[in-house]
Image (cartoon, rainbow, N blue to C red):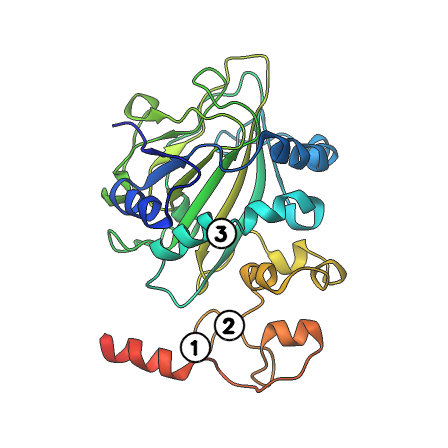
Amino acid sequence: MPVETFPPDCSAEAVSGALARDGCAVIEGLASPDAMTQVSREMAPHIEATPLGRESFVGRQTRRTGGLIPRSPASHALLVHPLVLDAVGLLLAHATTFRLHLTQVIAIGPGETAQPVHRDQWAFDFFPFPRGYEVQCNTLWAMSDFCEENGATRVIPGSHLYDDKLEFGVEDTECVEMAPGSVLLYTGALYHGGGANRTDGVRMGLNLTYAVSWLRQEENQYLTTPLEVARELSDDLLRLMGYQRGAYALGYVDDLRDPLEVLRGAGGEPGLGDLPNATSKLRRG
């Protein structure tokens, strides 16, 4: 089954509907090729300094370079793209908030073999989340052309509703071909993997992922982004990074203070969070 593709003026409801049904969707041309080129330029020295992977899962001919927030100002617009955040918010609406999980450029080099098919939510210590209960939503922005020959991501549409810890091969997957500026969205439960690169070029993708706020982030945003950089960022981006309470009584600072107010050096009413919202969820349960 091919991955459903949407135009850049589609609705968040349409995208989240495809994610709920198929576990994946593509939005074509959501960013300009120039925007992707700028991210590539800003990240180029960091990618060059990143060592190749040491085992097959991360890829022995693949470089995975994180820290996009302090290193690439051009990436910020992609991180907080309204259509993406709205679609993610609809998919993860059962949680009080969601936040940034990781930022990473994935550069698959010539000669790389296909990545083992897996679920990204296995990073949460292989916890067996209930079928259909999504805790993570990922985006993979094409920075270069994604095609069958150069290692385009491979997915199994609908597999987010399969049993956990299954094994699949490349022959079970669909190749997601995209032009620069297009973006693949997929849930943390979707079985997928990077493809083999049989070309002389490097396949470049920007992996920006989001997860419900009560789970640990894969990339530690507080140490990745120095405080002096963080204080210059917008409140919306800071909240997305995790400078907010994750739910009632989660993520406050010392004497029940709000983390964003602490970062800004501002005052504010201390507390555990939104008690009426927490109480309403308890009653619904």
Name the quadrant containing residue 110.
top right
How far apart, in angstroms, are the residues tagged by discs 2 and 1? 7 Å
- Looking at the picture, tell me which residue is in the foreground, 254 or 166: 254
Three-letter amino acid code of the residue under disc 2: Arg
Q: Amino acid at mark 3?
A: Pro
Disc number for residue 245: 2
Q: How many marks?
A: 3
At 73% from the left and 33% from the top, the residue drawn is: 49
Image quadrant where one finds the C terminus: bottom left
User: Going from the N terminus, do you reach mark 2 or mark 3 first?
Assistant: 3
Number of other residues with Cα within 10 Å of mark 2, as a class: few under 14, some 14 to 19, many 20 or more: many
Q: Secondary structure at mark 1?
A: loop
Whether residue 97 sits left or right of residue 143 in the image: it is: left
Residue 89 versus residue 205: which sits nearer the camera? 89
Q: Secondary structure at mark 2?
A: loop
Question: The N terminus lies in which quarter of the figure?
Answer: top left
Decide if residue 125 is in sight here: no
Residue under label 3: 82
